[in-house]
Amino acid sequence: MGSAHHSFSTMVVSTLQSVYPSLSLFVRIPQQASSVHHHSSSGDHLRLSIGVVGNVVSLMLFAAPILTFKRVIKEKSTGEFSCVPYVAALMNCLIYSWYGSPMVSNNWENLPLFTVDGLGILFECSFVIVYLSFASPRGKKAVYYMVTPVVGGFVAMVVSTSLLKDHHLRKALVGGFGLVASIVMYSSPLVVVKRVIKTKSVEFMPFSLSLFSFLSSCLWTTYGILAHDLLLMLPSIIGCPIGIFQIVLYFMYRKRRPSTLEIPLKIAMVQNVTPSRVDIFDENEPAALSIQMKIWRRMKKL
């Protein structure tokens, strides 16, 4: 039975290496563990330093939405804010905290990854809970539909991969799940990007979130290269161009003042009212326009 399992694991690894010829250059396998000690310690120190800086920047990234949710609590409404990016980030943190644990990685070689994603789980769970507290019934149902498969899928992945005897196969499978989760996480801000382009306003895309996302992707890409881990490097590479795109978009629309025709829409989006309730404002009437501008100035001070 043991030999059959070993043969199956060898076949899977051989298949992966045939599809990705350079896989052995980037992913450390157990058989190579003894040769790791012959590498210069300077490379490991540099990787650890990058991991520590990556932890700091990633924590700033996780903390960036705090102001957004402070506003949600103040207004007692989620308005037009979407919970998709936070659920996607939660899924990503769950998978990579497991990837960084000794059960998947070689002992504590990826300790920085384990610690930062463990803290990320706490942040994202807090954001989802706050969102659920103030979301509409329809919004709450949508969040439940997203969170349930994420948590269920994570538990199933942990149980199934824990049963594998081959450590390298376990790491390759968890890394594959992490790659898919990263694609989903880095794609989720595109929902916000679409809204920014549509409304020509960066109100729903804070600059700090875009900046820290880009910096975090760059740092973890470097960490993956130094660790010779393709499964860590690829997801972060995906995040780099998306982060650049968000930053460029921010500077395109950050100084744009909304026209009087857009003000009713802005009021509806922030105050979470339907457009029909805002239609009473007629931009052709000076008195109504004055009221609109006063409301808009008050909103800008929030």
Image: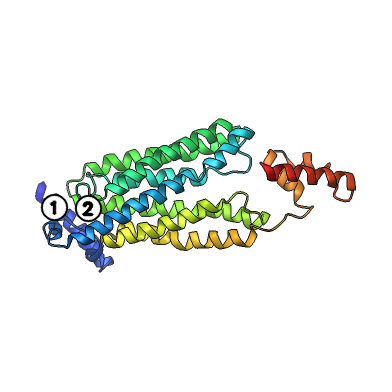
Q: Is residue 118 left or right of residue 18?
A: right
Observer-nearest of 150 and 192: 192
Image quarter for residue 220?
bottom left
Instruction: Say which element carries label 2.
Output: helix
Residue at the spot of label 2: 169
Q: Is residue 96 left or right of residue 196?
A: left
Query: In this orientation, which residue lies closer to the viewer: 167 or 278?
Result: 278
The residue at the point 41 percent across, 53 percent down is 182
Left or right, residue 298 beside residue 288: left
Residue 177: give its label.
Answer: none
x, y percentage for residue 184?
45, 52
Place of residue 74 in the rendered image (x, y in percent of width and height, measured from the top left): 61, 33
Please, is residue 13 above or below residue 64 in the view? below
Q: Secondary structure at mark 1?
A: helix
Q: Position of residue 161 (x, y in %)?
A: 25, 44
Decide which of tag 1 and tag 2 comes sooner along the chain.
1
Mark 2 residue type: Leu
Residue at image position (17%, 50%) is 166
Q: Please identify the quarter of the rendering in which residue 46 is found.
A: bottom left
Mark seen at residue 6: 1
Look at the picture and state if 10 lies above or below 118.
below
Could you tell me which residue is drawn at 22 percent across and 47 percent down? 108
Which-is-in-front pick, marks 1 and 2? 2
